[in-house]
Image: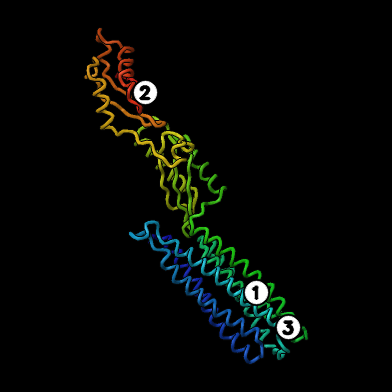
Amino acid sequence: MDAQAQQRRQEIQKVTLIGAVLDAVLGVAKVIVGVLANSHALIADGIHSFSDLLTDAMVIVVAKFSHHGPDEDHPYGHGRFETFATVVLGALLIAVAGAMAYDSIYRLLYSEQLPVPAWPALVVAGLSIVSKEWIYRYTKAVGEKYNSKMLIANAWHSRSDAISSIVVLVGVAGAMLGISWLDSVAALVVAIMIAKIGWDLAWESVQELVDTALSAEEVAEMKDIIMQIEGVVGVHELRSRKMGADALLDIHIQVGSKVSVSEGHNIGVWVTDSLLKNVKSITDVTFHIDPEDDDNDDTRIEGKVVLLPLRGDVMAALNETWDGIAYTENIKKINLHYLRDSVQAEVFMPAEVLTDQGFDRVEFQESLQQGTGHLPWLSHVSVWFG
C-alpha cells in the first residue's frame, strides 16, 4: 500500500471511530433518558443511534480491505469492497426509513394517548441534533476529499440520525403542548427523505458493480486530453468503468497507418501519462494501438474476424510467386502492413540496382504486382530503394 492510500485509510478510520464513540454515547443516553422521561420517540431514536454503530464497524472493516493493492486474485485492486459496502449502507438507510415510516403511520392510525414526555428528553434530543450534524459534516468532508462513496453514505446515515432527533424534538415539544400527532407526521416526511438518500447511494453503487460507464461529459474530457498528444489520429473506442474511487479505462487509439510498432506504443505511453496526470480518478489505463479506424467495420459489428496470413505464410507465397523474376534475389527486406482486411507489401531494394543498365524500376514493380494477382489477400506492392 502506497503512502497516499495509507493516509486515506487512516483518515477514514479516524473519522469513523470518532463517529462510533459518539453513536455509542448517544445511544445509551437516549435509551436511558427515554425510559426515565416517558419518551418512546427518544427510545426509538436511541435504537437508531445503535444502528449507526453497525455501519461504523462496517466502514472500518471495509476500509481496511478496500485499500489493499492488486494481488493475484484481485488484479485491479480491492476497490469494489467499498462499492459493495455502499450498497449495503444505502439499503440500511432505506430499511431504517421504512421502519420509521411504518411506526409513524401506525401511531397516526392506531395509537392511544401516550404519557406526556418530560423536559430531559428535549435536552438529549437537542444535544443529539448538534453532535450528529457536526459528525455528518466532518465525515462528509473526509469522504469528498478522498472520493469515498462508502464514507459519504455513512455521513448521510449520521445526518439521518440528526434528522430523526429533530423529529423527536418536535414530537416531544408538540406532545408537551398538546399536539400529540405532530411528531408522527414529521417522522413520516423525514423517513421519505432518508429513503431517497439511501436509494440514490445504493443505485449509484449498483451501477458501478455492473460496470456502468463514466458520464458522457467525463468521457468527452478524456478524449480531448488524448487528442492533444502528438501522433494520435483518433480515439474510436473508449471503455470506462468505476472501482470504488478509481476509474479504469480501455482505449483504442488510432495512429498513422505506417508508423512503427515502437512509435505507436510510445504514443500510447504518452496518452496514459497525460490521462493519469490530468484526471485524478484514473488509476489504470489499457491502450490498444490501431493503424486505422475500424470502429464501423462490418466484420466487427457482425462479430466476425478476418484472419489474414501471418508473415511466414506471406513470405512463402511471395517467394513462390516471385521465383524467376530478375533481381528479386537483391531484396533486402519486406515490410507488411495489415490494413482494411488486406496485406500491403513494401519491398526494399539496394540503391545499387538502379545503376544496373538491365534494371527497369517501373517494369520491376509491375512484375511484382502482377505476379501476386492471384493472392486475394494482397492488395498492393510498393518498392523502395536505398
Q: Which residue is mark 2?
A: 380
Nearer mark to the viewer, of 2 and 1: 2
Q: Is residue 284 above or below residue 11?
A: above
> Between residues 157 and 23, which one lies in front from this camera angle?
157
Point out residue 312 in the picture as x, y percentages from the top left corner.
Answer: 25, 32
For marks 3 and 2 on the same chain, the one whose residue lies earlier in the sequence: 3
Q: Residue at x 62, y 89 (%)?
A: 33
Q: Residue at x 42, y 63 (%)?
A: 67
Q: Is residue 238 left or right of residue 157?
A: left
Q: Is residue 128 left or right of residue 17?
A: right
Point out residue 47 in the picture as x, y percentages from the top left corner.
Answer: 57, 82
Residue projecting furthest to the right: 178
Q: Is residue 322 above or below residue 206?
A: above
Q: Amino acid at mark 3?
A: Ala
Evaluate whether residue 230 shows in this view.
no
> Between residues 351 and 135, which one lies in front from this camera angle?
351
Q: Secondary structure at mark 1?
A: helix
Point out residue 232 in the picture as x, y percentages from the top left corner.
Answer: 45, 36
User: Which quarter of the rendered picture does the N terminus lie within?
Assistant: bottom left
Q: Amino acid at mark 1?
A: Ile
Q: Secondary structure at mark 3?
A: helix
- Does the CB distance between marks 3 and 2 fall below 8 Å? no
Q: Which residue is mark 1?
A: 163
Evaluate whether residue 263 shows in this view.
yes
> Between residues 299 and 254, which one lies in front from this camera angle?
299
Q: Which residue is mark 3?
A: 173
Counting other residues with Cα less than 10 Å from the Cα at mark 3, is it few (<14), some (14-19), or many (20 or more)? many
